[in-house]
Image (cartoon, rainbow, N blue to C red):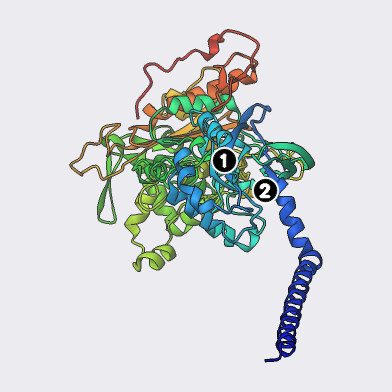
């Protein structure tokens, strides 16, 4: 064999292999070069952003809602500071792995946390998710101690609503809660994001946009443990606007205290302006429950409560007006000409009309009575005759013209329109004709007639003003610049009444209180208190049930009145459910409200009003009055009053 030939073949093979390796190495370098070029040129922005996020965080700064004040500038609703635990969703590689430990450490239901994450799936990843509100010191300590293990956790300072802890004016104020899915889908609310707190009822809902501030943010540098090391940029949040109400805390407090634990409602108006000075509905609720994260159990307890604490009885509950409706009947009869100032009827305790025996209250007769005494003593039989002559069409017409059977237009949500029946209404809803005997029941505020306390006090005080019915409002217009809402667009309704009509009715209502009538318990010596009581049967008197006051089937008791007799400046409606006679149970409540109003007007001392806002360190004391002592003419002189 020729070794030179063998050497030549091996050399050729080696050279060939080296050439192949060179090509492979060259290709690898080309691939690496292309990759580096891709990363440096095309993906530069993405990786720069990721690098920035590793050391820079954008943290939202939630704006506080505007405070809510009473008419004198006293704080009713404020904000308190609280810590919330937020879940960051940027660069969270081990989020799912860490969730069990995070949930256990913060005492959270892991299924609920996962549900929150799912709800926020479509929102930008830089937006944190609040997984625990009102965090405790233990929660904050847990996050601080585990920042390295759980960098996805962040502690945020979040302002929370602080309402009076005893539920004062709860139905007027309303509450805030997390925006619902239905609200998010609304085209009008495109600016809302999941997790936002918005007004859900009352003032908080009606004036949500006015009260809502503008959130800010800060961009901070953090270390590997998530601790803030520096600040790059900060846009401070802008608080919401302060909202001043027409509510007078002194009157609100006394109305709350006098109604007590009984179910019912109180409305206090300034008839000259429509300002709501007080509005009470019992039972009430604690709005502070909603300021944090309400549990399903708490919500179900409120929803399932048979006393319906979430219902604002002042404007959402429909009641029979009872004998208070006789004021409307008297005005309608005088205006229509079917009732004359000197008209008299004989009351023997019962009367037969349209084949039915109708009774006067108490079963006793009043003898021959005129209009004045019929109002003072609340004679049913007199007003049966008034109703018979008027007829249901005219009753319906005048009642509507005087503000019943339709919404008042108050700047609070979900107002009930009430009901004034008519033949057309019955045919449309019951598919039956109207029977003449039904008109007799309507004439004394029974049957299908339904009103709210707000409607009734507005109507009665509007009659006293000669037919001027101001739209009620709970916010002041001259102290809330830029305010939008129902109050800003309110217009007054006028249905001119003859001066003679106004004089006869107002003198009659003065007599109810001051001439030994059914409203004597509302009397304040030296003051022209006018009013009308009403007692409404929950079930027929023939039913074999307990009709006693306080029982399940006890009568509802009304008092609606105003003062003074000419140019009234305060009007009050009180209804106590199952409380018994209006003169016994509701008139005394009105008495205390009138008394407080006139004492305050004269600079006399009224019961101190102290508002304790939940979670604030000290109460907001209200010192409005400077002169001590109760004047003699405000003494309680209601003992021995005539009972209806």
Q: Is residue 273 left or right of residue 441?
A: right
Q: State the quadrant of the C terminus.
A: top left
Q: Earlier in the sequence, mark 1 or mark 2?
A: 1
Q: Is residue 485 left or right of residue 393?
A: right
In percent of width and height, residue 81 lies at 62, 32
Q: Secondary structure at mark 1?
A: strand
Label 2 CA crowd tier, 10 Å (few <14, some 14–19, many 20+): some
- Tell me the mark number nearer the camera, choosing from 1 and 2: 1
**Is 489 or 123 nearer to us in this picture?**
123
Is residue 427 or residue 125 the one in the foreground? 125
Q: Quadrant of residue 600?
A: top right
The answer to which of 100 and 535 lies nearer the viewer is 100
Mark 2 = which residue? 209
Give the labeled residue for mark 1. Answer: 85
The image quarter containing residue 26 is bottom right
Who's the residue at 26% across and 45% down the image? Answer: 540
Q: Position of residue 290 (x, y in %)?
A: 51, 40
Q: Are marks 1 and 2 in contact (CB under 8 Å)?
A: no
User: Is residue 23 shown above or below 183?
Assistant: below
Q: Which SS class for mark 2?
A: helix
Distance from the alpha carbon under mark 1 to that under mark 2: 26 Å
Where does the image place residue 515, in percent across and percent down from the top left?
45, 24
Q: Quadrant of residue 193?
A: bottom right
Residue occupying image coordinates x 44% and y 41%: 104
Q: Which mark is residue 124?
A: none
């Amino acid at each position: 064999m020729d070794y030179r030939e063998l050497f030549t073949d091996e050399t050729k093979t080696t050279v060939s292999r080296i050439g192949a390796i060179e090509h492979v190495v060259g290709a690898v370098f080309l691939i690496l070069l292309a990759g580096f070029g891709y990363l440096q040129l095309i993906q530069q922005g993405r990786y720069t952003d990721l690098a920035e996020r590793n050391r820079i965080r954008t943290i939202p700064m939630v704006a506080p809602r505007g405070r809510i004040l009473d008419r004198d500038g006293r704080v009713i609703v404020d904000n308190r500071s609280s810590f919330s635990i937020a879940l960051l969703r940027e660069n969270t590689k081990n989020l799912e792995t860490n969730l069990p430990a995070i949930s256990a450490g913060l005492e959270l239901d892991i299924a609920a946390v996962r549900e929150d994450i799912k709800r926020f799936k479509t929102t930008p990843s830089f937006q944190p998710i609040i997984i625990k509100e009102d965090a405790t010191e233990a929660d904050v300590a847990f996050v601080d101690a585990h920042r390295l293990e759980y960098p996805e956790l962040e502690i945020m300072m979040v302002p929370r609503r602080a309402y009076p802890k005893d539920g004062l004016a709860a139905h007027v104020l309303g509450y805030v809660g997390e925006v619902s899915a239905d609200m998010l889908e609304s085209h009008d609310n495109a600016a809302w994001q999941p997790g936002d707190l918005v007004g859900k009822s009352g003032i908080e809902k009606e004036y949500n946009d006015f009260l809502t501030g503008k959130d800010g943010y800060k961009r901070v540098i953090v270390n590997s443990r998530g601790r803030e090391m520096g600040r790059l940029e900060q846009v401070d949040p802008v608080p919401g606007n302060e909202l001043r109400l027409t509510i007078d805390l002194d009157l609100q407090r006394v109305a709350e205290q006098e109604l007590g634990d009984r179910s019912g409602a109180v409305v206090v108006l300034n008839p000259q302006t429509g300002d709501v000075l007080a509005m009470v509905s019992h039972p009430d609720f604690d709005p502070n429950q909603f300021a944090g994260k309400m549990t399903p159990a708490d919500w179900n307890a409120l929803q399932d409560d048979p006393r319906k604490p979430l219902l604002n009885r002042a404007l959402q509950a429909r009641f029979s007006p009872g004998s208070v409706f006789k004021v409307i009947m008297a005005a309608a009869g005088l205006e229509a000409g079917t009732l004359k100032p000197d008209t008299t009827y004989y009351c023997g305790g019962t009367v037969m009309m349209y084949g039915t025996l109708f009774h006067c209250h108490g079963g006793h007769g009043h003898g021959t009575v005129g209009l004045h005494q019929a109002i003072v003593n609340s004679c049913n039989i007199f007003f049966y005759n008034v109703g018979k002559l008027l007829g249901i069409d005219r009753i319906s017409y005048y009642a509507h013209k005087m503000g019943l059977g339709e919404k008042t237009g108050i700047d609070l949500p979900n107002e009930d329109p009430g009901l004034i029946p008519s033949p057309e209404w019955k045919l449309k809803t019951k598919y039956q004709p109207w029977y003449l005997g039904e008109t007799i029941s309507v004439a004394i505020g029974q049957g299908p007639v339904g009103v709210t306390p707000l409607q009734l006090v507005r109507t009665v005080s509007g009659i006293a003003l000669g037919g001027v019915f101001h739209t009620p409002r709970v916010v002041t217009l001259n102290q809330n610049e830029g305010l939008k809402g129902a109050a800003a667009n309110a217009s007054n309704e006028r249905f001119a009444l003859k001066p003679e009509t106004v004089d006869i009715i107002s003198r009659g209502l003065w007599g109810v209180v001051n001439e030994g009538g059914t409203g004597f318990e509302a009397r304040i010596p030296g003051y022209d208190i006018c009013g009308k009581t009403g007692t409404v049967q929950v079930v027929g008197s023939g039913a074999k049930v307990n009709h006693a006051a306080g029982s399940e089937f006890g009568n509802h008791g009304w008092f609606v009145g105003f003062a003074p007799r000419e140019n009234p400046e305060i009007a009050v409606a009180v209804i106590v459910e199952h409380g018994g006679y209006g003169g016994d149970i509701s008139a005394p409540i009105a008495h205390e409200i009138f008394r407080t109003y006139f004492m305050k007007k004269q600079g006399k001392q009224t019961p101190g009003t102290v508002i304790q806002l939940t979670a604030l360190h000290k109460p907001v004391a209200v010192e409005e009055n400077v002169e001590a002592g109760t004047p003699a003419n405000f003494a309680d002189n209601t003992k021995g009053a005539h009972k209806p």
